Image (spheres, rainbow, N blue to C red):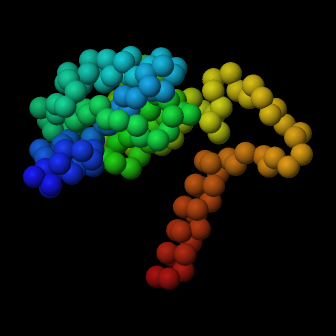
């Protein structure tokens, strides 16, 4: 019984096979009320893929699972794919674009889908607008990731 309890509680344990893209949609309060809301995102996913919550597409490519908090409340609504990639600040349009990218075999950019570099909302900074002593500028996360990939590639080529 203890194994069953663990397997049914944690979303990373699946008792049945899931699709190549296991879409986990956050269903807690911040994702319900932020932006267009998780219900709109869920409807787009279900309509585009022809599945309901807990189902997998006939071709085995997609599974949709509504889960509890994924820990990115400030960037709601959001989904996690395959227990590792976060896609945040979703809209109906950006969700459809993500699905189209996966359907065509592509890999979409992870993270914020509204093109901000921080956890700002769609109106940009509304407080702490700059010039405050002691507050560093925000990191350009895309730049940090690109530099890390470049350094890893350089290190790999030097070792071969």
Q: Is residue 27 visible?
A: yes
Image height of 59 relative to 94, above or below: below
Please identify the quarter of the rendering in which residue 63 is found: top left
Q: Say left or right for 49 vs 37.
A: left
Q: Say left or right for 106 vs 77.
A: left
Image height of 146 relative to 44, above or below: below
Image height of 87 relative to 33, above or below: below
Q: Say left or right for 99 vs 146.
A: left
- Rendering coords of residue 106 (x, y %): 37, 41
- Rendering coords of residue 2 (x, y %): 15, 55
Identity of the residue drawn at 25% across and 32% down: 64
Which one is in front, 104 or 57?
Answer: 57
Q: Residue furthest bottom?
A: 159
The total number of labels drawn is 0
Identity of the residue drawn at 36% across and 18% down: 39
Image height of 131 relative to 99, above or below: below
- Rendering coords of residue 46 (x, y %): 26, 21
Q: Residue furthest front?
A: 1
Q: Is residue 94 visible?
A: no
Which one is in front, 64 or 152?
Answer: 64
Please identify the quarter of the rendering in which residue 118 is found: top right
Which one is in front, 128 or 8?
Answer: 8
Identity of the residue drawn at 40% across and 37% down: 69
- Rendering coords of residue 4 (x, y %): 13, 50
Identity of the residue drawn at 75% across and 25% down: 126
């Amino acid at each position: 019984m203890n194994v069953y309890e663990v397997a049914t509680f944690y979303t990373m344990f699946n008792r049945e096979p899931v699709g190549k893209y296991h879409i986990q949609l956050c269903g807690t309060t911040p994702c319900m009320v932020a932006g267009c809301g998780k219900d709109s995102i869920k409807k787009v996913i279900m309509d585009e893929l022809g599945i309901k919550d807990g189902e997998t597409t006939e071709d085995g490519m997609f599974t949709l699972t509504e889960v509890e908090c994924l820990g990115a409340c400030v960037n709601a609504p959001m989904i996690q794919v395959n227990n590792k990639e976060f896609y945040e600040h979703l809209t109906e349009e950006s969700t459809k674009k993500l699905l189209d990218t996966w359907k065509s075999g592509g890999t979409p950019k992870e993270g914020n889908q509204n093109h901000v570099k921080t956890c700002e909302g769609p109106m940009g900074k509304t407080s702490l607008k700059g010039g405050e002593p002691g507050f560093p500028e925000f990191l350009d996360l895309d730049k940090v990731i690109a530099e890390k990939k470049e350094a890893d590639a350089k290190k790999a080529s030097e070792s071969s």
